[in-house]
Amino acid sequence: MKKIFVINGGQRFGHSGGKFNHTLTGLDAAFFNAENGFELKMTDINEPYDLDEEVRKFVWADVVIYHTPVWWFSMPHKLKEYIDLVFTAGHRKGIYRSDGRKNENPDLNYGTGGMLHGRQYMLTTTWNAPETAFTLPGEFFREHSVDEGVMFGFHRMNAFTGMEPLNSIHFHDLEKNVTPQKISAYQQRYLAHLKAVFAEQEVLAA
């Protein structure tokens, strides 16, 4: 069975309730079941957690799925705190050994000391910004995609641990222009994404 670790980074704070990220984790719970060939562990960053147990979840997993809203062009502070604390606790315990450099040649091989080689991760993000803010000339993100722009550092962080990315999926316009129809369409889109990504994984593993 493929082992899946889902992190719900939808922080409850201010006017943001993390509702759609909670919806996504509910879809995960339904999809990643034993009947479909999966084992599932989950963490909600709003709930208390034990650092050593979280490290063990990363080491255990074949795939880590991060669900995060984007606040001020970064992760919510509780998700950033979770990663800071858990990854630090994972030093030489399965997440990373070092920064990868050697004293005799410190200019080379930075970022190659991860211990999670063979694992993969998938990122979902939720935004108030419309998709056109990333794609149209002259709009705010200057035609940089989510993965190559705002979340570039997030992807390099995971590369530092040795994990490889699966295709990301991003959900836009979830505040100013959200409708029940959009939520329903996004739910179906996410399920289709899971089926496509993990069907491909099974083919690769066969």
Image (cartoon, grey):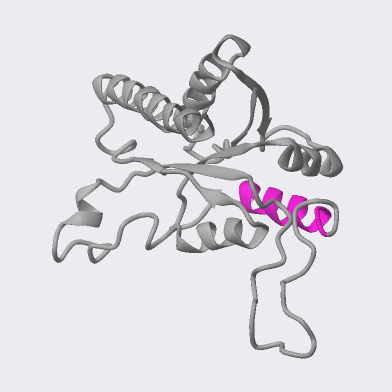
| In this rendering, position of residue 153 left or right of residue 42 | left
Residue 178 to residue 163: above or below: above
Vertical placement of residue 89 versus 167, above or below = below
Q: Left of 30 or right of it: where is 175?
A: left
Q: Quadrant of the N terminus?
A: top right
Looking at this view, is 18 or 53 the one in front? Answer: 53
Residue drawn at (50%, 42%) of the image: 122
Image x and y of residue 73, in percent: 43, 58
The correct choice, above or below, for 144 with respect to 65 in the image is below
Front-lying residue, 146 or 31: 31
Q: Is residue 123 left or right of residue 59?
A: left
Q: In the displayed image of the protein, which residue is found farthest to the front?
A: 206
Comparing 30 with 119, the one in front is 119
- What secondary structure predominates along the stretch shown in magenta? helix
Residue drawn at (25%, 56%) of the image: 134
At horizontal 30% and vertical 48% (from top left) the residue drawn is 129
- Residue 4: image x %, image y %? 62, 30
Residues rendered magenta in the picture = 78-91
Q: Residue furthest top?
A: 35
Check residue 191 for magenta coloring.
no
Query: Residue sitting at 32 percent across and 26 percent down?
Result: 189
In the rendered image of this protein, does residue 146 appear above or below residue 102? above
15 and 131: which is toward the camera? 131
Task: Estimate the x, y position of residue 52 in percent, counting from the top left.
Answer: 86, 43
* Marker count (numbered): 0
Indicate the position of residue 120 as horizontal and vertical percent values: 57, 44
